[in-house]
Image (cartoon, grey):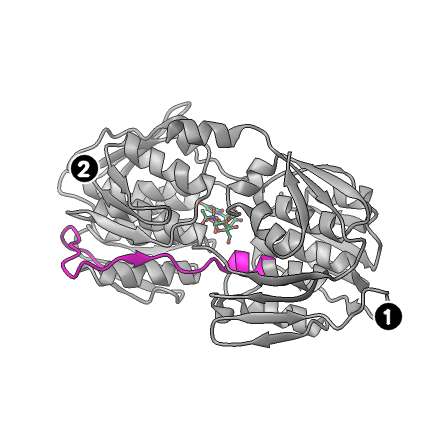
Amino acid sequence: MFLDVLCCNMTQTFRIKGLGGKKILSGELSPHGAKNAVLKVLAATALFSESIEISNIPDIEDVNSMILLLEKSGFFIKRLGARRLVCQPPRKTAARINTDIAKKLRASIVLTGPFLSRYGKISFPHPGGCVIGERPIDLFLSAFQKIGARVSRNKDYYTINAPKNGLRGANIFFENISVTATETLMLAAILARGETILSNCAMEPEIKYLAEFLNSCGARITGAGTPTICVIGGELLRNTKNIVYKTPPDRIETGSFLILGALCARDVTIKNCIPEHAASTIAILERMGVSLNIGKNYIKITNDFSGKGKKHFLATGVKTHEYPGFPTDLQALMTVFLTQASGEALVFETIFEGRLNYIELLNRMGARITSMDQHRILVKGPTPLRGRKLESPDLRAGLAYVIAALVAKGTSFIHNANYIDRGYEKIDERLREIGADIERV
Ligand code: EPU
């Protein structure tokens, strides 16, 4: 397993032959299980007295890193085929989680909640992940103190200790809306004494899924998916009904495929998705003139543009927002879309201060994007794009480059494709299936 992860870390490059603006891809795409759901349920297995089975797991590098992190902490993990595993938490574990792996992924911070409440202590480095801003952890640290824990820090590590008689429930107001802080404290509260009320929580569907699964195993969580979550603490969780956690489809993959389809496809159907989870993206695309046929668990994109420049999508301003607003994870992809839309549009990234670092290379491809400040850019379109050598700065901007390269005329090379592999499983193979000329070189 460790070797697999090391190999994935070696720099990879995609070679993409662009379509020169033609919308000719055709076929079906299905989102895999959601990265940001499965990583958290893996962390939550620490709250169980017995093993837990998880299915529909995406085969991506972040998941492999999380599995390795758990194994290094004494968890027994058995793969049951490509997308399924069983995870058994240990009775005791070393308090310190592996630095090298934890620094690779932001989700490693979510382990702190369940580890602290079950094992009483945890030491961990500042979590890693995509470089898209400062990504502080102050909300976690102050919330841990509220539930009775002692927080200390040396040069490389934070150490958190629970009191001898365990964590105690508390009222916690998050000053910023944070996905991982909401999840971490919800998990910590499950074994705390008494009631914890979390306010100003993130409302992402992955949080609701997690709470529903944990409730089916004895947790007492109400309000997940709303701004206020209440958790009544209790004993270790037991999966007496042998429920398998089925990872929900990745709504960011769904949104990515919608943008890709609108730009490059004659007709593409996104199957096995939950359209409701992509509602903000659907609303924006429809406003810009994309024709979508939406069913219960599929979305069909049909482009009646011939690709001969007769008609263009209409530009519209886009502002990222916590769920159910337009996701920051699709912001770079939407910017690529706007380079092909008619008019001028402001893209306002409200969540992260370092997530517009991809525009220079798009401009080198022919886009006309002006930086206004750390959070805002102005995109003028439509502009034809030309193939270029690109370097993926992070996971989502990396996929934005893939889409830009498909739109462009000529061949592009995207280095650091392994960043894209962190979140999108075998994206090259899946895009080839709908007719894209993309190769890993
Ligand atoms: N923030 C603080 N203090 C904290 C924590 C967060 O000020 O202690 C701020 C952040 O700086 C940011 C805002 O709160 O301005 C929101 O950040 P959040 O904590 O919600 O982000 P995250 O939990 O670290 C998750 C996803 C990201 C996704 C964001 C926003 C995981 C593992 N990651 O990150 O996913 O962009 O929520 O939706 O769940 C990705 O998949 O590519 C990705 C980056």
Q: Position of residue 49 (x, y in %)?
A: 15, 47
In the image, is residue 250 part of the stretch drawn in magenta?
yes
**Is 417 displayed left or right of 379 in the figure?**
left
Q: Give the label on residue 283, or none.
A: none
Q: How packed is label 1: few (under 14 Cα within 10 Å), some, or many (20 or more)? A: few
Q: Position of residue 286 (x, y in %)?
A: 66, 73
Q: What residue type is labelled 1?
A: Lys
Would you name the residue on which mark 2 appears?
A: 90
Quadrant of residue 315 within the rendered picture: bottom right
**Callout 1: CB less than 8 Å from ligand 1:** no
Q: Which amino acid does label 2 sit on?
A: Pro
Residue visible at 43% across and 59% down in the picture: 202
Q: Secondary structure under badge 2?
A: loop
Indicate the quadrant containing the N terminus: top left, top right, bottom left or bottom right: top left
Instruction: Name the main secondary structure of what is drawn in magenta.
Output: loop
Residue visible at 69% across and 71% down in the picture: 290
Q: How packed is label 2: few (under 14 Cα within 10 Å), some, or many (20 or more)? A: some
Would you name the residue on which mark 1 appears?
A: 310
Residue visible at 50% across and 32% down in the picture: 8
**CA gap, disc 1 to disc 2?**
63 Å
Q: Give the range drawn in magenta.
A: 232-256
Q: Where is residue 24 in the image (x, y as percent from the top left)?
A: 73, 61
Q: In this view, does 24 lie above or below 426?
A: below
**Is 412 displayed left or right of 65 in the figure?**
right
